[in-house]
Every structure is written in C-alpha cells, then in structure tokens.
Image (cartoon, rainbow, N blue to C red):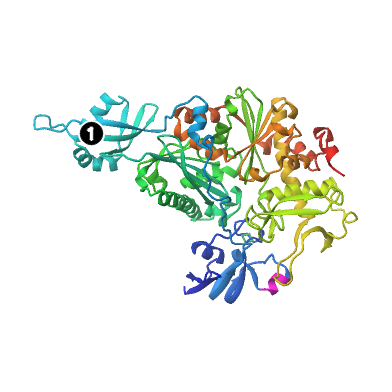
Amino acid sequence: MPNYQVTFKPNDLSVAAAEMASLLEVARKAGFVLSAECGGQGTCRRCKVKLLSGGLFIAGEQNLSDAEKAGNIVLACMARIDGDVTIELLPESELRYDPGAADRDLEPQEHPGYALKSLGLSLTPLVSKANLDVPPPTLENSVDDYSRFQTSFKKQVTDKRIETPLSVLRSLASEVRQADGHLAVIYAEEADRIGVVQAVHEAKYMYGLAVDIGTTTVFVRLIDLADGKILGEASDYNAQISCGGDVIHRIVYAGKGKELAELQSLIQQTINKLIKSLLKEHKLKKDAIKIVVAAGNTTMQHLFLGLDPKQIRLEPFVPTVTRIPVVSAASSGLDVLPTAPVFHAPSVASYVGGDITAGLLAAGIHRSEKLTLYVDLGTNGEIALGNKDWLTACACSAGPAFEGAGVKCGMRAAPGGINRVESDATDGILTFQVIGHVAPRGICGSGMIDLLAELRATNRITPRGKLNQEIDPRRIRANRGKQEIVLVKGDNGTGTDDIVLTEIDIDNLIRTKGAIFAGIMTLCKGVGIQPQEIERVVIAGAFGKHLDVNNAIRIGMLPDLPRKRFEYIGNGSLQGASMALLSQRMWQQTQDIADRVTYFELSSWPGYMDEFMAALFLPHTDGRLFPSVGKINVR
Ligand code: FES
C-alpha cells in the first residue's frame, strides 16, 4: 500500500501516512490532539480541519454546512488519505492545553502534609526507608547475600514476610559491598508482607507522585515524602481525548480492535510526559520517585491498566476490578523507579471510581458529623451524600455538555471561552467575560450556567427552555426553523461565525442540569432526608472553580440552600491521592470509604426517571424546592 505525505499547517510538520489511513489518526500519531467528542463517528463536528491541497477520500456523510463544505472544511474522522495532502489545523479543533494561572507559591495549608497535621496525623508514607546493617560475608560465615539481608531486615525492621523483586536481587551483591554493609532499604508494607522497593548504598531522594487520571485532564503532583510538601505540579489533556470525549465513547473505541492498547499507551504517554517535565524542572532522576498513588474513575483505571472496560457499560455494569492490586511502575509503563509500587484509590462501582473515594477522603465527609453533599463536576457527574455514619453515591448520566459537547458553540474552559455572563439589571444587556483576554471563540461550562440563569431572569427563555423572540428581537432569531440567540456577532473580515446558543443547546443543558439535580434528589429520597437538611455542599472538579453557585441554583442544578453552606475544594481526587500517599491511615480510610459507600445505580433506580422529568424545567417543576429563586428570576 503506498505511503503519502501529510503536511499539517501552521506547524509545517510532515508525516508519512498509508493510503486510506484516517486523517484523525494520522494527526494523533503526529502528536496533535484534535477534539473528538464522538470518538470518530462523524456526529460531534469537533474534528474540523481545512483541506489546503491534495487528495482526501471522504468516507460517509459529512455533517457540515454548505458554507463549510465550500470553504474546504472536512471532518478529520471521516477523511481518508488518498494522496499527498496539506491540512490546516483550526484553532477550534486543536486542543492546546492551558494550565491556567502561572506558577505561584502555595500557601502552607495547601500542602497535603499540612492537611494531615491538622488532622493530628504524622507522616507515614506508603513507602518507608530503613537503614540496615548487613554483616559482611566471611570464610567462616559464607551465608549468601540475600539470606543475610533477610535476616538483618527481620531483626532490625520487621519480621514480616519479605518479597524482593528480581531487579533488586540483581544489584544486591554490589550494593551491599559498595555500602560496606550499611544499606538504605526502601520498602512498602502491606498487611502481612513487605515488598522491597530498593536496596541501595545511598537513597538521597525520597519523592512520590500523586496522579489524578481524569477523562479530560491529567494532573501529576511531585511530593517530598519527608515533609509532605508539594514540589511541583504538572497537568495536560488526557491524550485519549482524540479517541472520544467521555468514558462511554472511550469504551466504545476500546472495543474496536487493537484500540485498547492504543488507549493504554496514550494515557501512559500523557502521564510520562508530565513526570518528565517535573523531573527536569527539579533536576531529579527517575529513581528519585519511590511510589505512585493514582486516582481515576473506573474506566480510566481500566484503560490505564489495559483492562477491557466493555462490561462497564453493559448491564449489570460490573467492572473487572474495584480494588486494584499494587503493581510495579515498570509493569504500569511509568517512567519512575521501575520497582516503585503503584497504588490505585479503590473504586465503588462502574461509575463511582477512585477519584470519588479519594475526593471524599480529601473532603473529610467520612469523619464529619455534618450531612454533606459532594458533587464532582468533571466530565462525568458523580454525587455522594453522607457523613461519618453512612455514605451513598451515584453517577448521573449528565453527559459532557458543560464541557462543550452537544452545544453548538460550546467549548472547554480555554482561551477564548466565555466563562462568565451577566445581564444589566435595568436594560438586560448581556456582558461577557472571556478566558485569556482574547476574542471569544465559544462558551464554556460556567458561562453556559450563567447564561441560562440570565436568560431566564430576563425572560428571554421560558421555564421550559424556549427562546422568546418578542423579548429580544435583536438577538433572538430563527435559523433553519430553529430559534437561537446570538451572543457575539461573527466577523466577515476574519471569517469567524456568530457565537450562538440554540434551543437544542438549551435543551441539552437543561437535561444535563436536570440529571445532576435528579441524582441529588434520588440520594436524598433514598435515605429519607429533605435537601434542606444538607449542612455542607462540597463542589469538586476543575469546572467547579469557575462555577457561580448562585446561578447553578437559579437554573435548578444545585439545591436551594444558604450560599454559605457551599465550598469549593478544587481537585479533590488529586488531594485525596496525595494524602493517601503520605499516610498509611489515610490509605486505609480510602478502603473503608469504598466499603461503606452504598451505590445507587440510577439507570434502574425506581423514581429516578420521575425526578429527572421533574427537573427538566428552569429551575424545577416544583417551585417549592427553590424558594429563593422565584424572587431572583424574572426582573
Ligand atoms: Fe469527528 Fe466527532 S465528528 S470526532
């Protein structure tokens, strides 16, 4: 089969590609991360590129407008290489990660070691270091090195069963002699056994990594095991994004053939890239990293380990594993000390994963008297409710609309995204705040919530989400028989389109917020409480950072409670993984949390559908649930 040359502009990068190769795949292999919410099914329109010259074969129907087709726009997932070709990557399709605010010095209380101290806990990392004296061999005592090592360890450290990897054994003879018998031994203690991680003449650095494997974004945190301080943090998009925007599309993609291995490789590459940048920044070698604690949703855990996730989306929704055994970094494909143990925060079920158990640990719900609601507003909406006596959790099939999927001009929180919307109290004029001080390109999750709240408050949309053209004929218009509101006019000179919100978008957003609120109500009713009894609401997840809680209540997404009961804890999953890394007691508590959570499978839960239908209204069909909103809405 002939090979053709594919050139990507504006980077001018050329790669070879086989005839009939998917352009989306070629771009991915060339290192470009294109948005592909639908996983290459040609429905999401996120993977648009411009054909500048050459031959492409279009396989299947292109879901594009006539103007886009006339402008040589194609969907990369539908395009096959059919000759030498030059492609322009469009800013709205290529995902360029923006880590947000520049580096800043962390406040003392932000370090996980501080969090442990405030709980009265000392640092007891999941790996320990012992200085071990191993007597030298003599002609009279010619016992082998490993036997002398084991005997010394049992006498001087603990008499638990010792397991030593072959790679440690291989270097033992030279290390013992180089150390003149005074070895530094790094080990992990688990129930009745000791796993030796390293036995060396000198172990100067003792660092660990906490990893949050998110569906959209991956975070890696470098932590000093000696004092529990964060040395650095790095993050990037999960490179699997170009294989599907959410867990369902990834599972479908994994089932295509060899794609499970590809997804595993992509997440390993993403994490290793972040590890490499942290090691470089702190002038460390990979052997300095003695342990990794990872937290991710159940699907991400499966894909990271190369486990088939198929059963996660098939009734009765049973994953391969919820308690992942400790595995070595080498067998996990991580570029740290090969024998470093990799711990995974335990999952509860297919759709309540280790990210939630870690988040609950960080939020301290399991040890609090207060009845607490935990809402993780990531790519998947997970909710937990409980206190120190009981815990419940569910995953609402909210879908990634707040990340831009299924919303015509939706996008992730990135430069050009409208992230705040306000309307003037007297004339209702809308004003926007845009991320990154650049021209607006679309609207991101927090902006969508603000916008819904403001449109409802100014009567531009009805409680059912229908646009009311009479109220704002200047902005609201019909387009091919469908109503839409123009937020920002496009510029013919630069070829940019209008930024709009359509009635179909509004419907998607109402379904998303409705799924979240219905999940909250189902948990409340399941345990026999009223939402008003919730004493504390913890919002976690990257999207929560920009969330205006008041507007989330005004649209009926979160319960109508006094605003001071709400708090944002940032990346709960990463913080929980960090705390577990540094404390054996905290690690044990993640297991206890997973044991104690009662999981509600909403797809078969009686009453969930009724709750969902009742929530498809702004704010809700039962106005008594939102007493403060009636006073705010409709100025
Ligand atoms: Fe190409 Fe969705 S339309 S990935």
Point out residue 179 in the picture as x, y percentages from the top left corner. Answer: 22, 38
Would you say residue 481 is visible in this rendering? no
Q: Quadrant of residue 377?
A: top right
Give the residue at mark 1: 182
Say if the magenta span includes residue 466.
Answer: no
Horizontal placement of 340 versus 144: left or right?
Answer: right
Q: Is residue 369 above or below residue 476?
A: above
Q: Is residue 176 above or below residue 461?
A: above
Q: Quadrant of residue 314?
A: top right
Point out residue 6 in the picture as x, y percentages from the top left corner. Answer: 52, 72
Disc 1 residue type (three-letter) = His
* Quarter of the render that holds ligand 1: bottom right
* Residue depicted at x 81% and y 43%: 618
Q: Locate the C terminus and report the quarter of the image it occupies.
A: top right
Residue reaching furthest to the left: 139
Label 1 SS: strand
In the image, the segment drawn in magenta is: 67-71
Q: Estimate how packed mark 1 is, as few (under 14), some (14 to 19) or many (20 or more) residues with alpha carbons within 10 Å.
A: some
Point out residue 519 in the picture as x, y percentages from the top left corner. Answer: 70, 36
